[in-house]
Image (cartoon, rainbow, N blue to C red):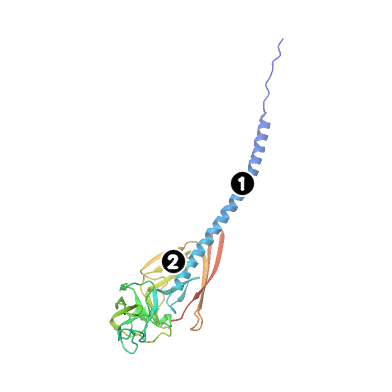
Amino acid sequence: MRRKRYQRGFSLVELIVVIVLLGLLAGGAGLLIVRPIEAYEDQVRRQQLVDQAEMALRQIARDVRRALPNSIRIAPVGSGFAVEMVNTVDGARYRDEFGGEFAASNDTLEFSAGDTDFNLLGSFNVLTPGAFGLRQRLVIYNTSAADVYTDAALNSNPGIITPAGTALSLSTNVPPTQDPEHHITMAPAFQFAQRSPGQRIFVVDGPTSYICNPATGRIVRHVGYDYSVAQPTPPAGGSSAVVVSQLGGCSMTYSPGSAQRGGILTIEITIADGGEAVSLLHQVHVVNLP
């Protein structure tokens, strides 16, 4: 007589216990993987915040260092700020007395009356012979932000900045035995009011502004707009570009300095994302020697 053999398997209870144990093991293993991934993502996010803040501060610092001496002005914008400066295209030293073979009446810049042309002591670094740009103007011995913006906006003639519409052109004088010098012509004639102690002359092409407004969460750079007596916040016209888009806060202080020492511009910005915030502080040395 044969006995029947019964095949035994897992019971439902045993199967449920196994599934629960596998779930606990998988959950523990998942935590071991998830935590490092989250830590890596946090580190990447912090690095991106730092990079964004650092790039913004460097861009502002670059424009500040290129600004016309004594042209920086600051105004509050909510809990943020607006900083404006006049951008310089190039600079050099003008000739105010005869030297070597440069002894013609049109070699030196005349301050006692309107002048139409004069030489530089050498040449510009960026500009080349030809007509100046439509927005480019000459500045000598600017000592106040209020003066240069007012004079440029009202197109008055106190002798600091050439009026809009002045035709400026650049050529090169090459005497037989002397080094060449750039020669500037102005039409109509213009009389600069004061001599620069360092014989400095600047070529400017208009104001530049940064508007830092925590209410909008952005820092925006504005260029290509017109001069105005009162600082615009923000300017009308021109073009703009977003520098920071995750702004949490910002502040700025400016110590203008004097003829004996440079100014100091202190900027602090905070960028926030994903519940984290990064604050960077940057100081820019401002040369105000006109």
The alpha-carbon separation of the residues under discs 2 and 1 comes to 40 Å
Specify few, some or many for label 1: CA neighbours under 10 Å numbering under 14, 14-19, or 20 or more. few
Quadrant position of the C terminus in the picture: bottom left
| Position of 223 relative to 17 (above/below) | below
In which quarter of the view is residue 109 placed?
A: bottom left
Quadrant position of the N terminus in the picture: top right
Measuring from the top left, give residue 204's x and y in whole percent. 37, 75
**Residue 214, can we see it?**
no
Q: Which mark is residue 33?
A: 1
Measuring from the top left, give residue 38's x and y in whole percent. 59, 51
**Residue 241, can we see it?**
yes
- The residue nearer to you, when weighing 272 against 58, is 58
Specify few, some or many for label 2: CA neighbours under 10 Å numbering under 14, 14-19, or 20 or more. some
Residue at far bottom of view: 112
| Position of 160 relative to 249 (above/below) | below
Q: Amino acid at mark 2?
A: Val
Q: Amino acid at mark 1?
A: Ile
> Residue at 55% of width from left, 55% of height from top?
44
> Of label 2 and label 1, which has the lower sequence position?
1
Residue at far front of view: 177
Secondary element at tag 2: strand
| Position of 25 relative to 99 (above/below) | above
Secondary element at tag 1: helix
> Residue at 40% of width from left, 66% of height from top?
240
In which quarter of the view is residue 63 placed?
A: bottom left
The residue under label 2 is: 220
Q: Is residue 204 left or right of residue 254?
A: left
Q: Which mark is residue 16?
A: none
Measuring from the top left, give residue 268's x and y in whole percent. 53, 69
